Structure formats: structure tokens, C-alpha cells
Image (cartoon, grey):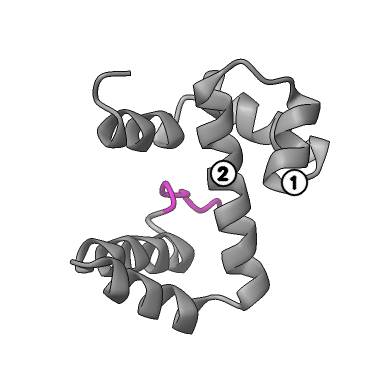
Amino acid sequence: MSETLSPPGPSRADDDRAALLDAFLTLRTRAEADSFLTDLCTPAEVRAFAERWAVARLLDQGGRSYREIACEAGASPTTVVRVARFLKEMPHQGYRLVLDRLNPKH
């Protein structure tokens, strides 16, 4: 007797991710966002996020080599390459969305 497999539904991880995104959307001020990140993440995780964001901003400005960006942002060359790939090639375009919203005349 064979069972018919139905397509998997949303996983617990998907539900948790959606709930986290909803939580971010409730934040109204920089202080609220800082408090939430401080509770949610370790200091090292927050530093890693800030480092990637610095790399994304420097890449967007142009005019610097990956090595210069790594040095200025205090990031590894691997991080610079990864952020550059997400900024330019990946379909998510989250970096691009936020960079354009923060600098609409770009």
C-alpha cells in the first residue's frame, strides 16, 4: 500500500521567521530597534550585522577596492565578497532596497 505524499506546508522555522519579521515591523524608533537587537542578539552578532551593513554602504559608494573596504569596515575580504555578491547578484535585493530608501537620489 503506497501513501500519497502531500506537499509540505510551512515549517516551524518558516513560521518563526515570519513572526520575527512581524516583530521587526513593530519597531518605531532607533531606540526601540536597539533595545530589541540587544535582547535578541549577542554583542558579536550585532557587530557582525553592523559590519556587513558598513560593507554594503561602502560598496554602494564605489571608488574603493575590496581590500580597502575590508580595511575600512574592519571586515574580512570574504565578508566583502559575500556582501558584494548579495548586493549585485542575488535575487533578494534586501541591501539594495534599504540603500535606495536611505539614499533616494542614488
**Residue 97 colored in magenta in the image:** no
- Image mark count: 2
Quarter of the image holding residue 85?
A: top right
**Residue 29, how many percent across, how many down?**
22, 67
Q: Earlier in the sequence, mark 1 or mark 2?
A: 2
Considering only vertical position in the picture, is 42 above or below 52?
A: below
**Residue 3 colored in magenta in the image:** yes
**Residue 41, how many percent across, how many down?**
54, 75
Which stretch is magenta?
Answer: 2-8
Circle 1 residue:
75
Task: Indicate the amino acid at tag 1.
Answer: Ala
**Residue 35, how many percent across, how many down?**
37, 80
SS for callout 1: loop
Q: Is residue 55 visible?
A: yes
Task: Indicate the amino acid at tag 2.
Answer: Ala
SS for callout 2: helix
Q: Is residue 53 left or right of residue 83?
A: left
Circle 2 residue:
54
| Disc 1/disc 2 C-alpha distance (Å) | 9 Å
Quadrant showing the N terminus: bottom right
- Circles 1 and 2, Cβ within 8 Å, touching? The answer is yes
